[in-house]
Amino acid sequence: MMDKAVKIGFLGCGNVGSGVWRLLEGFGRDISHRTGLSFEVKHVLVRDMTKPREIDFPQGVLTDRVEDVIDDPEITIVLEFLGGEEPAHQWMLHALQRGKTVVTANKVAFALYWHELQKAAKETGAGLYYEAAVCGAIPIIHSLDESLQANRISRIYGIVNGTTNYILTRMSKDGSAYEDVLAEAQRLGLAEPDPASDVEGLDAAYKLSILASLAFHGRVPFDNVFVEGITRVQSEDIRCGQELGYTLKLLAIAKRDGLRVETRVHPTFIKNEHPLANISGAFNAVFLYGHACGEMMFMGRGAGDMPTASAIVSDLVRAASTNHHLYPTFENAECPAIALQKNTDWHCPFYVRMLAYDKPGVLSKIAQTFADHGVSIAAMQQKGDKLNGRVTLVFITHSASEENMQLAICKIGEEIATVESIIRVEQD
Ligand code: HSE
């Protein structure tokens, strides 16, 4: 095995960057023994050079000048841990244009600028690696890119956000309210002080845009992903769903049927027997279907310094082991060969909970409104006691059009019932 010394640079050194440093420090010898590669971190870009740090960086490594990383001719691989859109996008682009390979954990900048970054990488022959951008330690990118090459993948169901899976798991197990679980998760450091990107589903949507693009070999832009977060989920619905044999998850769903592609992130009821129903706490999982491999599920830690460092260092080793980097191809790179669904144009069964007046004719009016919009009822339950003249009705519909369902709900007048919640169901 040929020994090769590789000089690398870090853009940022927060939790993930520190995890990568520690992993290289503690495990670099093993990697070197296995691969013949040794890595030297030449520069680490930080915002504040005076900030106290747990890592004792050697003299001259820390810098607050980005040029020391992206313009240094000795640095051949740049690891990006800044997160967010800018300046990460511009700095990655700059590095690629100078022929430096980029390894990134940044789903936002990558999902939004994939085409531009890949074009720059191809022009200079640099590599672009992003395993850590989706589901942390789970090797789903490499699996889609290489190990599942021989498959036409038609379905992906992912639990790709640990924060929301933790919150929904807690709500399901002890019936707590969303706000209480979120506050506790923030106290424990399991949710960000500003949890918007996680709880509103955006984090999952960036990841789904990347996963679906790779799996379907067609670029699915972030804007094409329908997004609804978990902020309106009520424990009462989780409980009603459990009685019907369902578990609630924030699912990232991508389906390809011929040339039609749909991608959506929203709270979803899945059957208790589905393998994803058992993925609890902050774990991530991706369940997919390929025409040759059949069903397959990946499960693991989607966040955290060391799990994310695991993906980054593996990408680093892969990048440093080759001079011939590979790039995914897309059917719609130049023209839209795949038809992306208008982002509310799909069919699925629905769970609907209403508070309805308990008097003659109410049920038939609701059923007629559903029927007028092509929505067929599969099951209905009246629950609990009458309160202020109203009772709880829970409907499960057969598969219906999302748009028709929303129209039907608007047509149910308040003198009949108020719709308290609608949750989409996946029966696969
Ligand atoms: N905030 C994400 C999560 C991890 O909760 O899964 C980083 O993408």
Image (cartoon, helix red, strand yellow):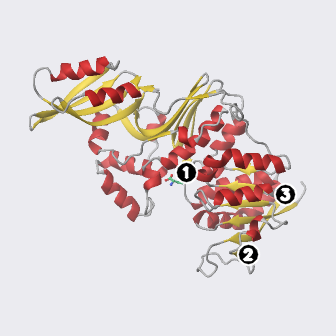
Dot 2 or dot 1: first in sequence order is 2
Q: Which residue is mark 2?
A: 61
Dot 1 or dot 3: first in sequence order is 3
The quarter of the image holding the N terminus is bottom right
Nearest to viewer (mark 1 / mark 3): 1
Disc 1 beta carbon < 8 A from ligand 1? yes
> Residue visible at 16% across and 23% down?
362
**Horizontal relation, residue 399 to residue 370: left or right:** right
Q: Nearer the viewer, residue 143 or 7?
A: 7
Q: Distance between the Cα atoms at labels 2 and 3?
A: 24 Å
Q: Position of residue 86 (x, y in %)?
A: 61, 59
Residue type highlighted by circle 2: Val
**Mark seen at residue 302:** 1
Q: Position of residue 223 (x, y in %)?
A: 54, 41
How would you rate the neighbour count of disc 1 (Cα within 10 Å): few for under 14, some for 14-19, many for 20 or more? many
Dot 2 or dot 3: first in sequence order is 3
